């Protein structure tokens, strides 16, 4: 029977304490066995945080028979390496059997990875990269506030990870937005991999939280069940508008005398002879050989949880048509589309939410903010926290847009986006100010690596619209579609793309489809393949070539991931190719096209135009001309290729 503790009580009964002690003995045995069986893992911190885990799960609202029950409280394990402790407690609570865990821990293909992952029933979030869990918990807590829900969010952290700056970003945000449904727990054992936290990097964690405006509860003994119960009860009933953190002084390797206060056991399992000594000290049977034999059987996979599938119903709203004479920037079209989405969906509890980092005006989120102030979140200049928080919010049945400049939305927070990718999030990253088009701000702000970076992830699409009309359709598409989507654009105003007869190309009948390119012009001699800010220059190059009697096609590849392989091959079979992009030439579209041709066994001359060196500080047109990305240079490249 699963232990449930009544948060309204003032203290635990002797029977409840005895039951927790019995649970601890069983869980400690599993921690030691699992890590010795795997010959790897982290027993020390699992033992120091075990009592917090046991009391927390006994007080949380959760259901082992329905791990994704909407009403459940969330538990984020920022110290993901203590998976032996987490899995032991989840097994104790009935999420899966002891045999499932011990037979599968850290085995290829099993449902029990070395760091906690959401394929394990009862685990909310894949973690392991320290310092990000609090941002994730903040995102979940903020989502519950937006939806008016009473769910609580727990976040278990280590003391060593507080050396990471992102934690401070998350602390500030939680205090600003009054997230009293958030409960932090810190396993303060004063040890990390290389020794004492005071020697590695000294700090006062209590003062840190206090200075950030949190309520701090300090426990001298983090293994005292009554003290843990009373602290969590106090935090659970908090309605003050101030987040609470419980900092508990614990003992690394608690309960095994030769392991206690030894940093080496942070990530060192016991050898079989040490395990025998430890199990004898616990007073339990040493059945290592039985489990070693069981681990020779095929791995079990029946416990593996499928990815989350929840996604809200979203109306795309009415598309906006920018006529052929309109001259505006894609970021303004994004802002207008976002406002339209809010008007269509935020008529009660918000569905569309937005996050930015001190750039509301630049990324054109002002209209959305004015319409839906309860759904817009200013995160300050805290991009690492904002990106991680956005990923978590996007998994709580909200459509979450995260917008900032390209270098901040991609390069700076690559690892945060990577964790959202692991977690099957539904991120909507819309980044402005990409490429040489940023112009006078210079190379530090000219993001030219976004496609190359996203190529390393497996669950992100990448879309780069050519004009305001295509921007409008793409933004509405990503809002209505689950999954991680990146939409990028430059800063400058851009003309509306038209057909040869002057009519709008991306009109109201146009439907954006991932993996499908747009033939803006059709010709017979060669094809220019392009996207984004340099598309108008390619159209101008087409005109110059036409005047010279050269017939070329212009293929707009707004969907970069996934790529339209069929159109690339069609273009290659018709003649030579020139790819043109405002991106690092060695990791962008040109490389993608070349790869598709090689894999398809199609041979044709190919020239890749792109950014070959850092740009300077100047007008975009001049920077493009310097790197051969202006219309005349593009046209000359085609002429030379055809010779």
Image (spheres, helix red, strand yellow):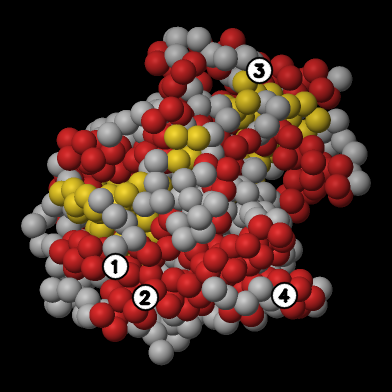
Q: Does residue 345 appear anywhere in the picture?
A: no
Using the numbered discs, state the Cα–Cα distance from disc 2 to disc 3 in whole angstroms: 63 Å
Q: How many dots with numbers?
A: 4
Using the numbered discs, state the Cα–Cα distance from disc 2 to disc 1 in whole angstroms: 8 Å
Q: Which residue is mark 2?
A: 20
Q: Which comes sooner in the sequence, label 3 or label 4?
A: 4
- CB-based contact (under 8 Å), mark 1 and mark 3: no
Near-viewer residue (400 or 327) = 400
Using the numbered discs, state the Cα–Cα distance from disc 4 to disc 2 in whole angstroms: 25 Å
Q: Is residue 63 above or below residue 242?
A: below
Q: Which comes sooner in the sequence, label 2 or label 3?
A: 2
- Residue 57: x, y in percent? 36, 72
Using the numbered discs, state the Cα–Cα distance from disc 1 to disc 4 in whole angstroms: 31 Å
Instruction: Write the residue at 74% across / 35% down.
Output: 591
Toward the bottom, the furthest residue is 1
Q: Does residue 439 appear anywhere in the picture?
A: yes
Q: Which residue is mark 4?
A: 291
Name which quarter of the figure residue 347 lies in. Answer: bottom left
Using the numbered discs, state the Cα–Cα distance from disc 1 to disc 3 in whole angstroms: 62 Å
Q: Which comes sooner in the sequence, label 1 or label 3?
A: 1
* Numbered label attached to residue 225: 1
608 left or right of 411? Answer: right
Dot 1 surroundings within 10 Å: few (below 14), some, or many (20 or more)?
many
- CB-based contact (under 8 Å), mark 2 and mark 1: yes
Instruction: Write the residue at 59% across / 10% down.
Output: 626
Q: Which residue is mark 3?
A: 612
Q: Is residue 245 above or below residue 6?
A: above
Which secondary structure, mark 4? Answer: helix
Observer-side mark, 1 or 3, equals 1
């Amino acid at each position: 029977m699963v232990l449930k503790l009544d948060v309204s009580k003032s203290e635990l009964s002797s029977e409840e304490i005895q039951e927790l002690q019995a649970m601890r003995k069983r869980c400690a045995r599993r921690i030691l066995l699992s890590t010795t069986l795997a010959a790897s893992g982290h027993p020390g911190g699992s033992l120091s945080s075990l009592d917090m885990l046991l009391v927390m799960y006994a007080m949380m609202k959760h259901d082992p028979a329905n791990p994704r029950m909407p009403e459940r409280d969330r538990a984020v394990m920022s110290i993901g390496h203590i998976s032996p402790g987490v899995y032991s407690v989840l097994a104790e609570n009935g999420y899966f059997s002891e045999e499932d865990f011990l037979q599968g821990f850290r085995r290829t293909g099993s449902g029990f990875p070395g760091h906690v992952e959401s394929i394990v029933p009862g685990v909310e979030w894949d973690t392991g990269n320290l310092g990000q869990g609090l941002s994730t918990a903040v995102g979940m807590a903020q989502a519950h506030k937006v939806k008016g829900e009473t769910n609580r969010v727990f976040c278990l952290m280590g003391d060593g990870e507080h050396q990471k700056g992102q934690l401070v970003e998350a602390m500030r945000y939680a205090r600003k937005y009054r997230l009293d449904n958030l409960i932090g727990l810190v396993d303060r054992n004063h040890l990390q991999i290389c020794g004492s936290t005071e020697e590695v990097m000294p700090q006062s964690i209590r003062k840190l939280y206090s200075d950030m405006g949190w309520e701090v509860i300090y426990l001298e003994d983090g293994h005292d069940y009554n003290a843990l119960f009373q602290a969590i009860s106090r935090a659970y009933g908090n309605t003050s508008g101030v987040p609470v953190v419980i900092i508990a002084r614990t003992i690394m390797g608690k309960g095994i005398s030769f392991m206690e206060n030894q940093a080496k056991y942070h990530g060192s399992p016991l050898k079989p002879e040490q395990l025998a000594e430890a199990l004898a000290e616990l007073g339990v049977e040493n059945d290592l050989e039985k489990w070693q034999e069981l681990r020779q059987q095929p791995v079990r996979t029946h416990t593996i949880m499928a990815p989350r599938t929840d996604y809200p119903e979203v109306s795309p709203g009415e598309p906006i048509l920018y006529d052929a004479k309109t001259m505006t920037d894609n970021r303004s079209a994004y802002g207008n589309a976002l406002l339209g989405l809010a008007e269509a969906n935020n008529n009660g509890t918000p569905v569309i939410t937005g996050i930015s980092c001190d750039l509301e005006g630049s990324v054109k989120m002002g209209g959305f903010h004015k319409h839906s102030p309860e759904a817009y979140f200013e995160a300050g200049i805290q991009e690492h926290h904002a990106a991680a928080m956005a990923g978590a919010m996007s998994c709580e049945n909200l459509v979450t847009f995260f917008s900032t400049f390209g270098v901040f939305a991609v390069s700076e927070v690559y690892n945060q986006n990577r964790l959202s990718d692991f977690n099957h999030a539904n991120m909507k990253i819309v980044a402005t100010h990409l490429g040489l088009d940023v112009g006078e701000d210079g190379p530090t702000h000219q993001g030219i690596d976004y496609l190359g970076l996203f190529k390393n992830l497996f669950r992100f699409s990448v879309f780069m619209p050519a004009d305001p009309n295509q921007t409008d359709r793409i933004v509405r598409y990503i809002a209505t579609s689950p999954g991680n989507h990146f939409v990028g654009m430059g800063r400058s105003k851009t003309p509306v793309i038209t057909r040869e007869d002057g009519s709008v190309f991306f009109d109201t009948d146009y439907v954006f489809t991932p993996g499908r390119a747009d033939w803006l012009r059709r010709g017979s001699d060669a094809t220019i393949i392009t996207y984004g800010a340099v598309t108008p220059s390619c159209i101008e190059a087409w005109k110059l070539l036409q005047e010279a009697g050269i017939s070329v096609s212009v293929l707009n590849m707004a969907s970069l991931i996934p790529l339209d392989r069929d159109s690339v091959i069609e273009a290659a079979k018709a003649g030579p190719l020139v790819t043109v992009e405002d991106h690092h030439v060695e990791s962008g579209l040109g490389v993608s096209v070349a790869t598709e041709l090689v894999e398809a066994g199609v041979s044709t001359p190919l020239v890749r135009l792109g950014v070959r060196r850092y740009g300077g500080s100047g007008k975009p047109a001049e920077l493009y001309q310097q790197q051969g990305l202006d219309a005349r240079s593009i046209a000359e490249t085609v002429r030379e290729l055809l010779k």
